[in-house]
Amino acid sequence: MLTVNSIKNGVVIDHIKAGLGIKIFKMLELDKIESAVCLLMNVSSEKLGKKDIIKIENVVDLDFRILGILDPNITINVIKDEVLVEKKKFELPERVENVLSCKNPRCVTSIEKYIDHVFYLVDKEKGEYRCMYCDEIYALSEV
Amino acid sequence: MLKGRHLLDPMDFTTLEIDEVLELGGQISKNPEKFSNACQGKILATLFYEPSTRTRFSFEAAMLRLGGQVIGFSEPNSSSVAKGESIADTIRTIACYADIAVMRHPKEGAPRVAAQYSTIPVINAGDGGHQHPTQTLTDLLTIKSLKDNLSNLTIGLCGDLKFGRTVHSLIKAMSRYENNKFVLISPKELKVPDYIKKEVLQKNNIEFIEVERMEDVIERLDILYMTRVQRERFFNEEEYLRLKDSYILDKAKLKKAKEDMIVLHPLPRVNEIAVEVDEDKRAKYFEQAKYGMFVRMALIMKLLGVEVC
Ligand SMILES: [Zn+2]
């Protein structure tokens, strides 16, 4: 069994759907930060069967909103002096840029590579976003 | 104020702004000569990334009748577009030469990209199967001119209601006016999408019914808006044969219609309206094309901010 020390101060991103960890790692650009970071993959979980976990030491102020787009079940635990001080809940952002990409082959984003992929939240409950260019609806559950 | 604005989606304008355009369009239709110098010295660029002669002619005629001039391309193969120039670069260059641009593009959202980089107004003249706002303005001006207003009407929409973007836009646009009712006539495979029913009709408590046969409802209609139903849209040949005649408007079916009903069609027609109907006084689809030019004249004037006293 692999063991990783619990962190003193920092953030634990938990309950990540197995396989998504590496994507989140890249999205948050964790390869570029100075702190100690640990990505655990395929950890067994009662809730999910298998899950990924990311632990980041001494950092709390990353923009985590984006994670809700990938998987709203993710939990973020903020730890101070080895105590869990905050469990963050996700609010889906109203507008996301260059996180989702439009799947509609008729969309202009498929040919003009320089433009930003912009989506607007249309349904909070269902987690649906609409492409700014072609209006294609994109459900987060399909990710 | 519409000066300097873009028109990308029919819902970009408020009803007040649309009324402003229609009001001017109405004035132009009554006395086009009065406006023949309104855009003197102005240049319209027509950027047609796919051919659509009818729409391009309508815009070009509109600008020429305002005394302005036209530049552009209708065959992307023969322009810098063929060399792989981006939409952003094309529009930034064109904006140096022209005062207003019209774009037709096979990709959805292309005019929005142009608008992001443009210093001159951009009009969407059709982006794939997505939006065609000047068709909607055309329909509105035709209805307003021929029925005197845009309220208290029973509007029949017939044909392919699933894929027809003009139909969706017209439903949205007419839903913003009071007390309109819709009669949606289509085969069950080509019914209006659910989101239109939910988000536009039910949400605003607008009365509508869905039927398969035109004959059953034609006598109730103030407007019959015909669209093409293509054979390949049907799931089976049997179904097509059963329904095909019920979507062809002919003299016999018109007999039951109101005397002052008007028949509209975004054109081109294939065979959904029998040629014998053309001589009926209720057939207004060619007149509709004329209103299309008048409304484009009004739109160009508004976006350029020119007036005629
Ligand atoms: Zn898109």
Image (cartoon, rainbow, N blue to C red):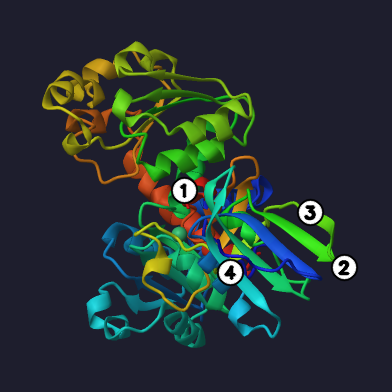
Residue at label 2?
Answer: A81
Give residue A87's mark.
3
Across and down, in percent, residue B198 comes to 55, 30
Which comes before the other along the chain, label 1 or label 4?
Answer: 4
Q: Chain of mark 4?
A: A
Relative to B46, does residue B248 appear above or below in the rendering?
above
Which comes before the other along the chain, label 3 or label 4?
Answer: 4
Q: Left or right: where does residue A128 sit relative to residue A85?
A: left
Q: Are marks 3 and 2 on the same chain?
A: yes
Q: CA distance from mark 3 to mark 4?
A: 19 Å
Q: CA distance from mark 3 to mark 1?
A: 26 Å
Q: CA distance from mark 3 to mark 2?
A: 15 Å
Q: The disc labelled 1 sits on which kind of residue? A: Glu
Front residue of this view, candidates A56 and B277: A56
Q: Is mark 2 within 8 Å of ligand 1?
A: no
Q: The disc labelled 3 sits on which kind of residue? A: Lys
Across and down, in percent, residue B294 comes to 46, 54
Q: Nearer the observer, disc 3 or disc 4?
A: 4
Residues tagged 1 and 2 counted as in contact (Cβ below 8 A): no
Residues tagged 2 and 4 counted as in contact (Cβ below 8 A): no
Give residue A39's mark.
4
Which comes before the other along the chain, label 3 or label 2?
Answer: 2
